[in-house]
Image: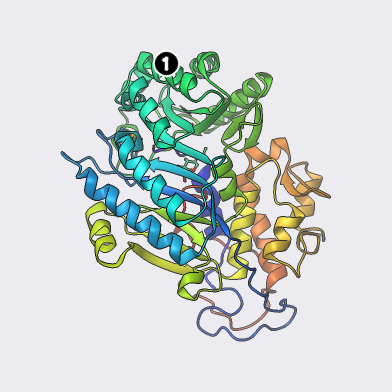
Amino acid sequence: MAIRGWRPVAAAAVAAARPGGGGPGRGPGAGPAWGAAPEPVPEPAAPATAALYVHWPYCRKRCSYCNFNKYVVPAVDESAVGACLVQEARTLLRLSQVQSITSVFFGGGTPSLASPRTIAAVLEAVAGAAHLPASAEVTLEANPSSASPARLAGFRAAGINRLSIGVQSLDDAELRLLGREHTAAEARGAVEAARRLFPGRTSIDLLFGLPGQSQDAWAQGLAAALGLCDDHISLYQLTLERGTALAAQVWGGTLPAPPQDLLADMYQTACAMLVAAGFRHYEVSNFARKGALSTHNLSYWRAEQYIGVGPGAHGRFVPWGEGGRSREARVQTLEPDAWMQEVQSRGHGTRRRVVLSPLEQLEELLALGLRTDEGVTHERWGQFSPQLSLEAVFGEPGEAQDLQQQGWLLLDGGGLRCSVRGLALLDSLLPDLLCQLQRRWAPPAAPGWGAGAARRSPTGDRAGGEAAGVVSGGCGE
Ligand SMILES: *[C@@H]1O[C@H](CO)[C@@H](O)[C@H](O)[C@H]1NC(C)=O
Ligand code: SF4
């Protein structure tokens, strides 16, 4: 459900903070570890658990701001798509050799357009190939226009136990501007029906920073949403994406672009209102009360394993079943018809596999972990870096200490995390921290490692951001 905002930038920062060269042991000219570079780290043992993401690529209509991997087609061959999702889930579960699935998330596209039967078939396949505990969070993203009480009841019977509803706004004029299919009244109806069926487990998405939206209009909209919502809210700043109708209107001068300082004020206002209403600001874009945090998304931010099924889905896991020993980034084929053909002929549609180096894994851990209020704990860091502690990297004079002195960052017994103020600025803090990490990992003075080598970006999951592909700047030396 094309929600974006603060997320993608973190991945851009990961890429931006990487100079053209590779890390130790990588790229042309990469030799053995030298100088003060740490000993090669033994790969961590693969945990026997993973989260599972399932992508439903279709939508009925194109929203004006959306550049997600979604397709608007006259007729979806649902039984064929469903069979391929089932097949690919089985294959990837086998390749990962995961014993137990901790959560499942159906995203899209508009997965609430799939029939409950298809959702049930995928969940049955998962439960047949791995353990799927009854307590596991199983979320479906739903659009108000495909969330009638009867459909929602069908999804619940299929095994869904949490809903994430793409409300986006409770103002009809805003919804029209966004090109959404639903009205404010329909959004209210959907949330109310969802709360009856999934009490305490209904989340809503809201967008802010629409062209022409005032601070007051946003605050009023959020207040209305607070009167409607359950215990979880995700807030996204609208971003203008190339190739979308909305961006064309703004760049063509027909609609005003929201000024940066207004966007920052809107975000701060929202945080204050939500905290006052009892919500914990547990991640840059996410708020929960009564402990209703999304465990699925937390597993991304904690850099746990996850498997991505469906066109364009991303995964991070150790493919033990293929003889793999280290964590890989995987991306499935984007285009649904091509993806289906691949699944039909070889059981899965994995388009790209990249083994992540230990440094890349730490970069992701940092970029994602710092998005949460718990930050990167010592324990989690130690799982990825048994030899070089958080203290050893960030406790010495350098960027992290400066940021601590300025009140943006904390490093203590709990680990490394942003202060409340720092969370809003994470995207500008990250490049400095990534530079410090790279320096400690492999001193820049070391000659001859892959300078100028073309560098791919290993990131690109929706939790960590779209594939960034931005390699600019780099660390000062
Ligand atoms: C949670 O993860 C799903 C699946 O990757 C994604 O579509 C969704 O936007 C994420 N939600 C939040 C609140 O970050
Ligand atoms: S419902 Fe709209 S915003 Fe969501 S994926 Fe489809 S086109 Fe994009």
**For the point 43% across and 22% down, which residue is it?**
169
Circle 1 is placed at which residue position?
188
Outermost residue, left direction?
A: 74
Would you identify the image quadrant in which residue 134 lies? top right
**For the point 36% across and 29% down, which residue is it?**
154
User: Horizontal and vertical percent for residue 115?
Assistant: 29, 36
Q: How is the image coloured?
A: rainbow
Quadrant in the picture for the C terminus: bottom right
Would you identify the image quadrant in which residue 304 lies? bottom right
Q: Nearer the viewer, residue 213 or 418?
A: 418
**For the point 40% across and 41% down, which residue is it?**
107
* Left or right of 252 in this view: 467: right
On screen, 392 above or below 150? Answer: below
Q: Is any part of residue 450 visible from this angle?
A: yes
* Left or right of 199 in this view: 182: left
Report the number of numbered marks. 1
Q: Callout 1: 10 Å neighbours few (<14), some, many (20+)?
A: some
User: Horizontal and vertical percent for residue 236?
Assistant: 49, 33
On screen, 165 above or below 432? Answer: above
Query: Which kind of residue does numbered mark 1 sit on?
Result: Arg
**For the point 15% across and 38% down, which residue is it?**
74
User: Horizontal and vertical percent for residue 257?
Assistant: 41, 30
- Residue at disc 1, secondary structure: helix
